[in-house]
Amino acid sequence: MNTSIFKAYDIRGLSPQELDADTAYRVGQAVVKFTRASTVVVGRDMRDTSPALFEAVARGIMSQGADVVDIGLVTTPMFYFAVAEYDLHDAGMMITASHNPKEYNGLKLCYDDALPIGAASGMDEIRDLALAGPYPEKKSGTMVETDIREDYVAKLLAMIDVRKLERMNVVVDTANGMEGCVIADIFGRVRNVTMTGLFLDLDGAFPNHEANPLKEETLEALKAKVRELRAHAGFAFDGDGDRVGLVDEQGENVRGDLLLALVAGKLLRDNPGQAVLYDVRCSLAVAEEIERAGGVPTMCRVGHGFIKPQMREMGALFAGELSNHFYFRDMYGAESTDLVMLTILELLSETGKPLSELVAPLKRYHHSGEINSKVAGVAAVMARLEQTYAHEAAAVTKIDGLRLDFGGDQGRWWFSVRASNTEPLLRLNVEAADREMMEKRRDELLALIRS
């Protein structure tokens, strides 16, 4: 068994080369042993290797006497809904490699309240149990198939007053990923909005483009269709539907942290005084907009394995990441890309303004985007950066790598540098009040990192 596939947030690797049926069987057994579950919800995406991994996982679970609730082909947000909404389940497993290319597959694990099982919350123990297996079979559990789609859509639409949505045209690109299984059901209940779909057919080969809205090149077809139809907005989903990208009516990409600010502002109008979490890579504009809307901005670590527990502890209303993951308290603190999409449509209807006009004031700083550098000694480089810059910083934040914020006569700027959880990489983000300052600081930081 290849233990390198056990990551900080999930299990993921080339499949079947690294993640094969034997490993999936062992993980199924290990999850039951670790959680002591009597019932496990299992969902899957449309990748070519998902049926074989599902069969193996299910056998492993049932071999330890637990029952399997097979919810079939679902998005990851639908999976979290199924685990948290019903009271009959003790744990959940989603078979997906999310936004990774077709050669990959993976397993996302969670407890009965949809809180993730990660490196700090059980993943290491499950890895060790899987490695020590396989285990003798007990009295076999049973399997039942359940279609959760109707309940999911009903829950989603109960959170938005769809009757107040103005007439709009939108384009949705599901990239042949799992969002294609539910998007027609959603817009079939939203009468005033006309949806034009791109690449809605489920296809694990991703024949049209990679299912990753963080990559600008994957948005080309969406941008072109939005301009062609003069649509009000365009939405792009990743392979398992837990990331959503936004394109305005001019065909311009809206960065993930600015989308976070838009949604937070809308939610806080009805929930003033609530906390909103944003990760260490996000623009200064995010905290400013949260405060302006009457919320409490709270910086947090990157990754759902850290954000979801912090949301629960704080009772936070909403959270988001630069990487286009968004979490709602009213959806069990889990990702809900569909709710992001509907909230943006509600915002457009309420304001009567084009999306580009709503986003423009948020672009008051210049952000580098995330830049990766391969380095030999991650800790040594981090120490060198801190030694070089910390004495000038107005604020030093170490909740996730190193973030330093600066003020003074030259204007506000900051940088964040974090180590990858899986590769010898440092991830740099820089932002400044003007582009020249951002580019100058970016270049000097990269020179120091790569020297």
Image (cartoon, rainbow, N blue to C red):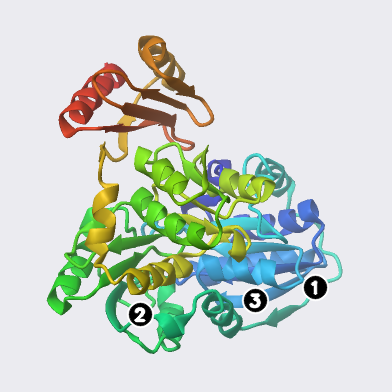
Secondary structure of the residue carrying tag 3 is strand
Of residues 148 and 66, the one drawn nearer to the viewer in this rendering: 148
Q: Is 75 on the left or on the right of 235, as rendered?
A: right
Residue closer to the observer: 215 or 151? 151
Residue located at (40% from left, 58% from top): 99
Label 2 close to label 3 by CB (< 8 Å): no
Front one among 68 and 187: 187
Three-letter residue code for mark 2: Asp
Q: Is residue 252 left or right of residue 304?
A: left
Q: In which quarter of the image is residue 386?
A: top left
Which of the numbered marks, if any, corresponds to residue 328?
Answer: none
Density class for disc 2 (Cα within 10 Å; few <14, some 14-19, many ≥20) is some
Q: Residue at x 22, y 30 (%)?
A: 438
Q: Which residue is drawn at 47% across and 21% down?
A: 396
Question: Looking at this view, is 46 or 181 the one in front?
Answer: 181
Q: Is residue 314 left or right of residue 269?
A: right
Q: Residue 432 location in percent, x, y?
A: 26, 31
Identity of the amino acid at label 3?
Asp
Q: Name the residue under label 3.
A: 70
Location of mark 1 (residue): 141
| Mark number, residue 201 | 2
Query: Residue 423 location in percent, x, y?
Result: 42, 35
Residue 301 in the image, given as x and y percentages of width and height? 52, 38
